[in-house]
Amino acid sequence: MHPAAAEPAPAPKQPPRSRDLGLGVGALPTGPHNALTDVPGVRVGHTTLVRPPHVHSGVTAIVPAGVGPDRPLPAGVFAGNGYGKLLGSTQIAELGAIETPVLLTSTLSAFRVADALVGWLLERPEAARTQSLNPVVGECNDGLLSDIRTRPVREEHVRAALDGAVGGPVAEGCVGAGTGMTALGFKAGIGTSSRILPLAGAEITVGVLVQANFGGTLRVGGRAVTPASLGLPDGDPEPENGSCMVLVATDAPLDARQLTRLARRAVYALARSGAAYGHGSGDYGLAFGTRPVGTQAGPAAVPDEALDPVFTAVLDSVEEAVLNSLLTATTTTGPRGHTRHALPAAALTALLSRP
């Protein structure tokens, strides 16, 4: 008699997202993955670097299909509080376009990441004649939970994130550029969400991705939520001045000026979650479209008075993405003993159910 075959090990349980807890934001429907990648042609890749307790860092790549120096995409940028480094932002503001993927990482690794992105692009056939390039790299400070001075992100990590970027579900929480992030008193990271809505007679998608790392007091459904209110330690007195990068993508026919309006709403939306917009916080919104407008390659931009539902989609998606970044994170202790606890789903729902 042969011994019974072993039962396969159960897949690890995934942390809940906001909608799993009945905490979806707004009335608009989400895309199939409730993620930035619901916008057609947009891919996301992560490289995660963890060597406890000293390194909790990484890089995240947002890769729109076909973007390059010969095929720029319309874009707009907004600095809510400019205490940060968004490499390439002045050219976006001047020309209203991006010509590279957008990468997110740790503050002191941003410059290495930009150099690696330039090298990756110059090797591609479509850049064979390129002599000028504007790499776009955003950052948040992970120095509370990682030894930021070691600058652990290297060229091979950047290339792995770019080459590994895919569509479909997006990993959230302590992955990629979100690995060492903290926000609103809790462990945070990468979060994403999307909305589908009609615009100018067609269905369009708005997707967002946040690298959440900012101070303030979390608000869920208008209610203040602190670690103490959930039975968690209050943590240490280290301030959270670490910033937030918010990426918005859409297949709507919007021009650069209109995308700048979306980028503003992306930063405004952080207030819904309780952002303090402190002195040391770099709060940036960057919005891009996936198709050119106003040329033979694309339709004319929609009128501004039609944009209100799109603004709503951005505001709702950012608020939900921030909550997803907290719920999917894991409790982390850094090199100097500082700990940030993940937002516990059961305790949160219990708190919100009380009068």
Image: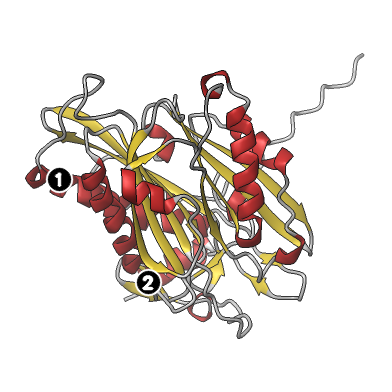
Most extreme residue toward the right is 1
Local secondary structure at mark 1: loop
Question: In the figure, 355 relative to 170: above or below?
Answer: below
> Which residue is located at x 68 percent, y 47 percent?
48
For discs 2 and 1, the disc positioned in front in the rendered view? 1
At label 1, counting other C-alpha atoms closer than 10 Å, the crowd grade (few under 14, some 14-19, many 20 or more) is some
Residue at 47%, 70% in the rendered image = 83
The x, y position of residue 97, in whole percent, is: 35, 40
Q: Nearer the viewer, residue 152 or 336?
A: 152
Q: Is residue 233 above or below residue 117?
A: below
The quarter of the displayed image where residue 47 is located: top right
Please state which of residues 314 and 151 is positioned toward the viewer in this rendering: 151
**Is residue 164 visible to the viewer in this orientation of the structure?**
no
Q: Which residue in the protein does label 2 denote?
A: 274
- Give the amino acid at mark 1: Leu
Q: Quadrant of residue 270?
A: bottom left
- Amino acid bearing label 2: Gly
Real-space Cα separation, disc 2 to disc 1, in angstroms: 25 Å
Q: Residue at x 53, y 69 (%)?
A: 242
Quadrant in which the C terminus is drawn: bottom left
Provide residue 192's location: percent of width, then percent of height: 44, 47
Q: Quadrant of the N terminus?
A: top right
Q: Is residue 66 visible?
A: yes
The numbered mark at residue 307 is 1
Q: Which mark is residue 102?
A: none
Which of the two residues, 102 or 318, is positioned nearer the viewer here? 102
**CB contact under 8 Å: marks 2 and 1:** no
Q: How many marks?
A: 2
Q: Give the x, y percent position of residue 112.
A: 66, 50
Q: Which of marks 1 and 2 precedes in the sequence?
A: 2
